[in-house]
Amino acid sequence: VSASVSSVYKCFAGIGGRRGWYHATALWQLRGWIDRFFGGAGLRRGRRHPDDLRVGDALDFWRVEDVEHNHLIRLRAEMKLPGQSWIQFKCIPQIHGTSTLELIDGTSTLELDVIFAPKGLLGLAYWYFLYPIHRWIFNGLVQQIVKRREESDTRT
């Protein structure tokens, strides 16, 4: 990402709630409605603060499990699922050179990890059936974070 670590972190730390999920908003809303239909919280919980996240915070149908300022946010799904799921955003400063480990100013690497631990055959079927959709959603989410940060950093 042609943007600083702090800028990229700020973007993914501000996801959800009123800002939405930056990509495939209608599908996130549909998932929220499905969750509420099956007795879950859906998207109605929002978030405590638009920019700040703390361990234990609710974030739509996720729970904040880990926060490392300007580096990492891990969310655990609290939606109704046939298994358990996590999403983790991580931002790392880009380094060049092998011996000097010099940082490249204003450039970072964004990693998005999605983990699903299926429960039984239903969980496996859920994961493999929805894999193409999840791949599209999460790839689009990363692209939107990159786009927002690069555009924001070039304007300032």
Image (cartoon, rainbow, N blue to C red):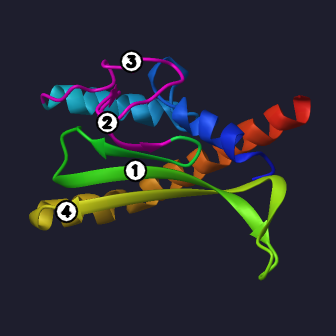
Could you tell me how far apart the alpha carbons at marks 3 and 4 are, in whole angstroms? Answer: 29 Å
Q: Residue furthest front?
A: 100
Percent across and percent down for residue 53 are 44, 29
Of badges 1 and 3, nearer the viewer stands: 3
Q: Residue furthest right?
A: 155
Check contact, mark 1 vs mark 2: CB within 8 A: yes
Of badges 2 and 4, nearer the viewer stands: 2
Could you tell me how far apart the alpha carbons at marks 1 and 3 are, in whole angstroms? Answer: 19 Å
Residue denoted by label 3: 48
Q: Which mark is residue 62?
A: 2
Q: Which residue appears at 54% of the width and 23% of the height?
A: 51
- Which comes sooner in the sequence, label 2 or label 4? 2
On screen, residue 11 above or below 132? above
CA neighbours of label 1 inside 10 A, class few (<14), some (14 to 19), many (20+): some
Check contact, mark 1 vs mark 3: CB within 8 A: no
- Please state which of residues 110 and 130 is positioned toward the viewer in this rendering: 110
38 sits to left or right of 99 = left
Q: Amino acid at mark 3?
A: Arg
Of badges 3 and 4, nearer the viewer stands: 3
> Magenta region: which residues?
39-68
Q: Which residue appears at 19% of the width and 62% of the height?
A: 118
Of badges 1 and 4, nearer the viewer stands: 1
Dividing the picture into quarters, in which one does residue 43 lie?
top left
Q: Amino acid at mark 1?
A: Ile
Q: Under tag 4, what secondary structure? A: strand
Dividing the picture into quarters, in which one does residue 29 lie?
top left
Residue denoted by label 4: 118
In terms of secondary structure, what is the magenta stretch mainly? loop
